[in-house]
Amino acid sequence: MEGFITWWQGAIVFGTVIMCGALGEILTQKSGHLNLGVPGEVYLGGFAGFAGAFLYENSTTNPNTFLLIIIPILCAILAAGLAGLVYSFFTVTLKANQNVTGLALTYIGVGIGSFGGQYITAKSGSTGYARAQITSDVFTESIHHLTGSSDNWFLRLFFSFGFMIYLVIILAVVLHVVLKKTRVGLNLRAVGESPATADAAGINVSLYKYVATIVGGAIAGIGGLVYIIIYNNGGWSTTNSIETLGWLAVALVIFATWKPANTIWGSYLFAFLFWFYANANVVGINLSVTQADLVQALPYFATIVVLIIIALRKKKENQPPASLGVNYFREER
Amino acid sequence: MDTAIHFENVTKTFGKVVANNQITMDVKKGEILALLGENGSGKTTLCNMLAGIYYPDNGKIYINGEVANIVSPQDSFKYHIGMVHQHYKLVELFTAAENIVLGLNPKEFKFDIKAATKRIKEICDKYGFNIDPNKKVYNMTVSEKQNLEIVKVLYRGADILILDEPTAVLTPQEADVLFSVMRNMKADGKSIIIITHKLQEVLSVSDRVAILRKGEYIDTVETKDATTQSLTEMMVGEKIQLNIDRPEVVHNIPLLEIRDLTIKKDDGSIAIDKVNFYIRGGEILGVAGIAGCGQKELCEAIAGLRKIESGDINHVGESIIGKKPQEIIEEGIAMSFIPEDRLGMGLAPSLSITDNMMLKDYNVISPWYNPFVNRTAAREKAKQIIKELDVKTPSTETPVRRLSGGNVQKVLVGREISAGPNVIVTAYPVRGLDINSSYAIYNILNEQKKNGVGVMFVGEDLDVLLALCDKIMVLCHGKVMGVVHATKTTKEQLGLMMTGSLDLNDEKPDKNFGIAADSLIQDIQAVEENKEVNE
């Protein structure tokens, strides 16, 4: 039981990172743009959030809790949103190839993030790596003091996390409702399905694509913040795990069949499967190091299984947005 | 009558091409105005300026007597103008109601689909449309989609409706329903512009006809004073022969014989149900039927692209069942299918004419052991087709999608014929083409017929089928209603057979339509029977 709870607790935080990336990417893809720059956006969000937190808590002796929360979040949103803006400018305005632009954004994002993180680490004079400890403490403070006892297994499974974990779940539900029930959602889906139709109906197609991509980038950026501040306890380390999480997020979009509500359980399942290699002994399996690498690919296998199921069911509602990956030219026949 | 729209010296150019030159004309309130002209005469361009898709380079547009500045589709709604485009602008995944309210009331956060549904029903009842607001568009027939498009613009309060070639994809019966709806809307005081090049429709539905030719405005005439001949002359600018040739050719042996053929559609339902027919060399067999009656599946099966359930397809006494498409092409069977969107099957839109020439016979032009393609030979062939069929293109290297519809079809038909087939299966080769281009295609087919080629012509215009074909086979829900001689039947009889009201199999039960007296298949069966006896 103890092993399972540890596995679960790690997976929920890890899954939240994937969920943010996937939610952002769903929003972007619903506008018809396949943004493969998600890993870059997550990375940039992580770096900017870390930088904001680190610089703020080192600039004052008496940090304000509200600012400790809001500065890293704003930094992450701004940096990753800016990356989304760059992507939109290239693909919506200049009509550049979406795949090439997205991949470039991933590598640029990872590059800038690594450089900036190293720079801060070196400047701070710390050996090893820099840490935004105070901010991390605020973010990771469990909400279960609201409910009392901490050794109850139920509370530990569901109420032992920081507030961000719950906010992201709420965000997923809100996005689901917005896409399904509101005018804005209807218009956005129309833009992704058939931009020519949306255009003729008087919807500003470029505006929707820009906003969806920028907001999508910002949400993905929050994922990076969650990784550094919560999962990594505020420590910046030049690990490529963030990039891996970005690709898992792209896979999760397909796994969730483009429905934000599905990312809630999908992301936790992905994280659970991803960490299976380290927790296999909980279910009585001993893995060698070489086997572990293979087992880490489980989420991708799960995605392939979902793809096969979707293909067999042939349900139009589970297909990607019809114009996904195709730039819109108004005067093209 | 008051004037609803007044164009004054409207000019629109695309690069060097003048699409509309100094057009001055009127549309009256409460009339149906037919806008007539050949492909590329500027009809759609003119109307797109009303819809806010294009903006005129010069000149003014007056709506109800006031200068209108229409720079976007929203402005167009503001002036109560609604356009139904030739390519429907619908979101396949949405319901009818969702498509209708799309883009409306942007301030409203949550949309009230119930109120919308109620208003849609009211509009449908008022004018006689038949639409289920909760049906998803991907489940709709072409005619339902069109109705939906019209309801959509009415819902937005359109008083001026523009219909761009609305009957191009409809059966005669569906077109009649559309015309009665149009008359209801006219009675309600709405002005309607119908863009078309089908003269019969112009004469039956419109009040006045405005004619455009090569971007120039020619004249507007009262429909009651017009005839097919007078309109055609104004449209093409010269007297042209309206009769399609039907050269008499000595019929040859049956080249393609179909026996008890059953094919399924993608969704598993029966597309073609135990069908028998044959095509002789030197004849054109017309295939008539309402859209979606198995024509597409039949063409695909003959070309080897679709699995058959049972039965036989026999080419000069030899079954082609189970052969690969490549082998069927090598046997001399050519298939060209022009789908509703006119680009889909047969050509790769982004490739040049030369590259498209190579698609089918790259292995003939350059042998398999040669890893390089022979572009020179393909380019020669492209040049030849451009010259023979008078394809209008800047060069042989122009991507096919940049050509106009008629020229795309000429390239496709030209390539199929240049392979020297002995059986040509062609579906809707003149879909959306103007008169001159259509005649060019008919002449090509007649030329092939004279050379002893068997032609199967799947068509939608009954007048053309009656004039061009030797025999006409009528399909209804995948069953053959009978095969008739084109000279011995009427449009009305074909119409009854298309809807299934008349089945010649019932009339003459002992006559076996579709089985040739000199069938080449029987010999094989006889041989097989002998074999069984010997064993």
Image: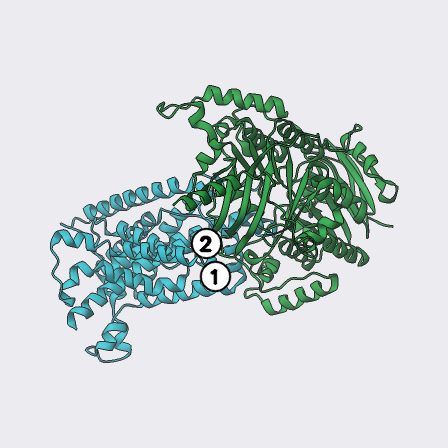
Chain colours: A cyan, B green
Rendered image quadrant of residue A6: bottom left
Name the one closer to the observer, A124 or B317. B317
Name the one closer to the observer, B359 or B72. B359
Which residue corresponds to mark 2?
Answer: A30
Q: Amino acid at mark 1?
A: Leu
Rendered image quadrant of residue A306: bottom left
Question: Viewed as shown, does residue A167 lie left or right of B20?
Answer: left
Residue furthest to the bottom:
A148
Residue B76, how many percent across, how many down?
Answer: 68, 49
Question: Viewed as shown, does residue A292 lie left or right of B206?
Answer: left
User: What is the total number of numbered labels drawn onto the structure image?
Assistant: 2
Q: Amino acid at mark 2?
A: Lys
Q: Are marks 1 and 2 in contact (CB under 8 Å)?
A: yes
Rendered image quadrant of residue A102: top left
Name the element at disc 1. Answer: helix
Q: Are marks 1 and 2 in one subunit?
A: yes
Name the element at disc 2. Answer: helix
Which residue corresponds to mark 1?
Answer: A179
**Rendered position, B217 above or below B127:** above
Crowding near pointer 2: few (<14 within 10 Å), some, many (20+)?
many
